[in-house]
Image (tube, helix red, strand yellow):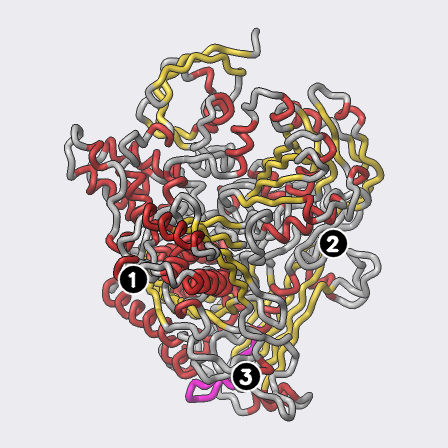
Amino acid sequence: MTDKARVSLIVNGERVDREVERGRSLLRFLREELGLVGAKDGCGKGQCGACTVLVDGRPRRSCLLKAERLSGSRILTIEGLSGPEGMHPIQSAFVREGAVQCGFCTPGMIMATKALLDRVADPSEAEIAAALRDNLCRCTGYAAIKRAVRSAAAELGAASAAASSALRGPAPRPEELGRGAFGASVPRKDAPAKVLGKPIYAMDVADLRARAEAEAERPLFGKMLFSERAHARIRSIDTSKAEAAEGVARVLTARDLPGLNAFGLFVPQQPVFADREALYLGEVLAVALAETLEQAEAARNLIEVDYEDLPILDSAEENLREGSPLLHPGTKDNIVHETHVRKGLYASEDGAAAAFSHAAVVVEGEYETQAVEHAYLETESCLALPDGDGGVTVMTGNQGSEDYRSMIARSLALGADKVRVVLTACGGGFGGKEEPTVQIQAALGAVLCRRPVRISLTREESIRTSTKRHPMRIRMRHAASSEGKILAVESRVVADAGAYISQTVPVVFRSAVTAAGPYEVESVRADSYGVYTHRNPSGAFRGFGSTQASFACEAQMDRIARALGLEAAELRRRNALAPGLRTSTGQVLDEGAAYLGTLEAAAEALSRMRAELASSAPGRALGFGLASSYKNVGIGTGLADGAGAIVGIEAEGRILVRVGAADMGQGSDTVAAQIAAEALGLPYRLVDVLACDTRSCPDGGMTTASRQTYVTGNAVKMAAEALRSALSSVFPPEDRLRELDAAGLRGLRDRALAAGLGVSAEGRYLPPRTFAHRTSAALESGESDSALDIHYAYCFASAAVAVEVDPETGIARALRLCLAQDVGKAVNPMSVAGQIEGAAAMGLGYALSENFAAADRGLLTDDLRKLGVPRIGDIPPIEAIIVESPQPGGPYGAKGMGEVGLNPVAPAISNAIFDALGVRLRSLPMTPDKVLAAIRAPREGEGAAKFEEEPGDAR
């Protein structure tokens, strides 16, 4: 039997006759043989839908189909949907309605929508959910996608089939034609390329490069060998059989690394290649490089590792105990980092007892949050290209190209000038792409083999090796007066840091400084510890430590309100942080703090929900919940936190903004364009953005801590204002700027050059000074309030939710969800709403279904379904409320807001479940089994004003 079969297909209207390897998926055939990379590989198991194409008019997940079985079929991919006239109406609708964020799911979503609208002209909500049930989105929360489907249906229904081509291309919005478009819902800069399925992701670039005619230009495929033990001594790694295998160019191990065998954003600790000891299941031991993917996989499987099993220490609480075995020799204990907060009575040793002595209500409880996988739809992928002079260019999605460059250069023993990192479109990050995964190994292979090298992880490999959200065990104790004033808060957090430091230091810090919530509390004692275990390293994840603390704090607030007979909103209102009040660390908030605005909006939404959902379905219990949260904007704590930008007029008559802020779907490129257009007084449509190419873009720091709108936004504003000032003599009058087109901008540039003026300007922005956190929130003699400024801005959010629970099955289902967020000034309201909706959906998954789990020898949750990532049918209607209160110092009053929105969702759902059933879920996720266990647990009636454990509590 031959290994190949001949297939004859009609692909996007053209006949294709090819030989194809037996077993080759349609997805790989389209991408590797035909160069149609619009269909994306997000899982390889048919679980994400990113690879959806139409086969004979039906939506099919191309990763599950064998190409040789499809002869005679008609295939339509995203590339065939648009025509010479422009975008298809569905593509236009996705751009127009803000249904594109990271964009990795977008081609599959659009193709599934095409199949739906071909069948149903005016689909219902249920029909939309059914049609898109196999398509995952991690960014949008599905709300904008639903709007786009309805919009496309309306547009298609308004035209006859014969006239449908005239609808191609989005109609220009008035704000696009005006000047800056700041504050307007203009289409995102990156949306057209994403809806058209352009080759913009690292996998796309690599797949197209693999079709190069010259062998030297085609990349080698790399496959990583991961540890099969959670903890073991590595006696030996034998690569001899792999090196002798067909097609193998080289097998990389630690011995091939010329520089530092360690990486880490803050502390270089995690090995690039583990060679002595494996501390978790995702350790990289070796990389096989070969001519084809199959050859690389076969070689990887031939590598022999001799392990000596060692005890697995997987309990953070146990590892925290004095005298526990050490995970890292040379350390005094297993504590990665600890942070302490003392305010009010806790400033003195004998103040603890006094803090609770006059309380009318005391509540205490223990809460547990889980490890969560980021589940960005684009798995880690990289193409490394040698430059012929000993250097390397690395093309990859990431959250900070400069930091990647530094880590790659350090491990390869190269000067920074020898390493170039180019940001390709990033298919989601959420904190999980702040540190390298495949990039150092790919760069090493490219330099040593003098060939391009591509490494793309499968979904299982990505889950196996990547960082996770910190699991935490939180003990909280609150004291409140009879009037509902929170008198004291005590918090103790033990966070599972996993095997390496990663970003445990700042995450543990945030869990302590936000533990008391967005409330003014007289006395606070917070102690947080990050502890090593033999689990995946815990790293950055949207919310960054404030998420876990919020779950515990907001459940406590609900318990206090019930004990005092107060409405949930009223208790929060009486204690709310506001401008001029002090946080638990003693910082005085500025005028940008708009927590009360979010609280009132959520409280009003909760009232509407109660009125509109007066009763539950038969046999179901209905409950309503409210919760709030806050988080920092920017890195703060005295650390460097600046950003740069360059704004210039290009020869073709367009403005180019160059920044170091990585857009991973949140829309920072569009924000930069809008701010530049506003500062220059020029139309938004003339502005382009280039980001995170270390050869030509200034450093913008890591895209983290909700910082880029503030710091990079200010840098862009400075650069644009400097350019306009420098060219004031050749700039046309204000009213003529509105009509300026590319030809007019070319003329302006020519006049500037003729006058000897520069046509670009650079801005470097440093935010207001902050100071390192110190344990005591008390000012020392002679200090001003600013000495306690650990951050230069904060953002706030409040959530209201209606939940229906089935007491027989334990299934809790959100019926309505409102999320109100303080955003400073909304640069792009459509994008801001999209961030809020996406955060709400992620918070829902965190609350009810998502969990990462591993055993000693393998993963228990090794795919997207087992991880519990929410699908379109799991998400209720979301009301996104934008609360604006200009942030002092922010660009035109704007500030970051992308993280905090998910924080209040889980506690709001917990509070709603208690409202429905009278049982408290204190362990995440709140699965049906946990709900049933809580219902069946013995319960006592509420009565006493003072109590330690709430009746109906369940862990």
Residue 365, quarter of picture: bottom right
Vertically, is 56 above or below 633? above
Residue 892: percent from left, percent from top: 39, 68
Q: Quadrant of the C terminus?
A: bottom right
Give the class, few, some or many, for how many residues have Cα within 10 Å of label 3's Cα (few <14, many ≥20). Answer: many
Nearest the viewer among 413 and 733 is 733
Nearest the viewer among 169 and 517 is 169
Observer-side mark, 2 or 3, equals 2
Per the picture, the main secondary structure of the magenta-coloured stretch is strand
The mark nearer the N terminus, 1 or 2, is 2
Q: Is residue 299 left or right of residue 625?
A: right
Residue type at tag 1 = Pro
Q: Is residue 354 left or right of residue 567?
A: right
Which residue is label 2 attached to? 269
Residue 219, quarter of picture: top right
Residue type at tag 3 = Ala
Residue 733 is tagged as 1
Which residue is label 3 attached to? 488
Local secondary structure at mark 1: loop
Q: Residue at x 53, y 86 (%)?
A: 522
Residue 135: percent from left, percent from top: 40, 39
